[in-house]
Image (spheres, rainbow, N blue to C red):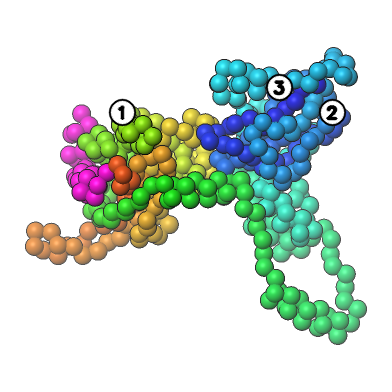
Amino acid sequence: MVEVKLHDVGEGMTEGEISQFLVNVGDSVSVDQPLVEVQTDKVSAELPSPVAGTVKEIKAEVGEVVSVGTTVIVLEKAGSTSGTEVKKSEPQAKAEKSGEQTTFKMRIDKNRSAPSTNRVLATPYTRRLALENSIDIEEVKGTGPAGRVTDDDVLAFRDSGGLSDQPAPYSSVEDKSREAVQTAEATLEESEMIPYRGRRKQIGKKMTHSLKTIPHVTHFDEVDLTNLIALREEIKEEEGSAPGAAAFFAKALAMALKDYPVFNAILHEDKEQIELKKTYNIGFAADTEEGLIVPVVHGTERLSISRLDSEIKRVMKMAKENSLTKKELTGGTFTVSNVGPLGSTGATPVINEPETALIAFHKTKKMPVVRNDEIVIRSMMNLSMSFDHRVADGATAVAFTNRFAGLIENPAKMMLEMV
């Protein structure tokens, strides 16, 4: 027999939630065929079959949260006889022996043939919502990434009259009125419970630990984006398109971090050392359907603004599709939260431990400012930067944001310094 266990598919992962089983007991499976879908705090992954054989036992339930190392499926290898010694699956055995990453097949794989079961993409909460409304989720057309069924899809299906089980008709007007009163009274007393697990639970743990461990200080400033906006418009007219503002921000941050490396650092308090990282791997906070996630663009100091624009768009797209790999989820040295497009004017962001700092960019708006003793209209953006006060001081943070602002407000100067 071969045990298929939950393996670590992301840095710091300790548990995962069973989203759905893709096989049943007695099914024949081939090598690398997906067996079960697991939702972790960072990704949704499929555990592939390490051997060809038959499913003998399913040892977990949909919705169950299991720890790394837990056996979820037992397979009988093709050609083996009953009573064969139970052994670890090949991917886990290799991982434990060499310490290498176990490879998981992500759910979006166009080259893999579809399994025998109907694999509807939906979160456990969405499935429960469908169940509570007597809806067969396989009948709902998904509008999310890769055809994922969302909460709104389920509610729209319900509101359109697509319920699979309709309530019994009322026998009289009096019964209908009495039922309406009872329903209204019950609604006043009831509350809704949603799951606190998976990515949301991991975010909670990480944020709580960060706030308990790191003495946060938040510095606020503003940046004049007028010249940058004009430059992007000029590039757009000549080239047909221009890199997004985030690419310019990332390049300016990499240059500022080189001058103030204390913000591109990790504190090893137990060793009484501060590790100054020599490469600048910037993470970009992404708001996804399943919660906050931070994909990382590695080596921003080596990339042109055009290449940075492509990389940022690539990892953000992967985040929305829930298809990020371990490389894009690990190794960050500094984090950016670009919440301006959502309308934010200020925040006190929580540091992405073990990093030292995080900067948030807020809404850009035109406003009157004084330039050369004259009142002019400029496009101003607020920013907030949280930093670890054990590692850096307020004066250094002000100097860092001044350096960043100087580059962004004078993009031509930034281009010259890049040469």
Q: Gap in Å between the C-alphas at discs 2 and 3?
A: 14 Å
Tag 1 residue: 278
Q: Which residue is mark 3?
A: 89
Q: CA distance from mark 1 to mark 2?
A: 51 Å
Crowd rating for badge 1 (residues with CA inside 10 Å; few <14, some 14–19, many 20+): some
Residue 271 in percent (x, y) is at 36, 31
* Residue carrying label 2: 56
295 above or below 178? above
Question: Looking at the rendered structure, which numbered label has been put on residue 256?
Answer: none
Q: Is residue 413 inside the magenta stretch?
A: yes
x, y (%) of residue 399? Answer: 20, 46
Q: Is residue 295 left or right of residue 13?
A: left
How many residues crowd mark 2 within 10 Å: few (<14), some (14–19), many (20+)? some
Report whether residue 87 is seen: yes
Q: Earlier in the sequence, mark 2 or mark 3?
A: 2
> Please, what is the three-letter code of the amino acid marked with disc 1?
Lys
Res 308 seen here: no
User: Which amino acid does the dot numbered 2 rest on?
Assistant: Lys
Residues 188 and 207: in front is 207
Question: What secondary structure do most residues of the magenta stretch adopt?
Answer: helix
Q: Is residue 122 left or right of residue 388?
A: right
Instruction: Classify residue 273 by image quadrant.
Output: top left
Percent coordinates x, y for residue 350 in the rendering: 41, 50
Q: Residue at x 43, y 51 (%)?
A: 211
- Residue 330 higher or lower than 146, as above or below: above
- From mark 1 to mark 3, how far is it between C-alphas? 39 Å
Q: Which segment did they paint magenta?
A: 392-419
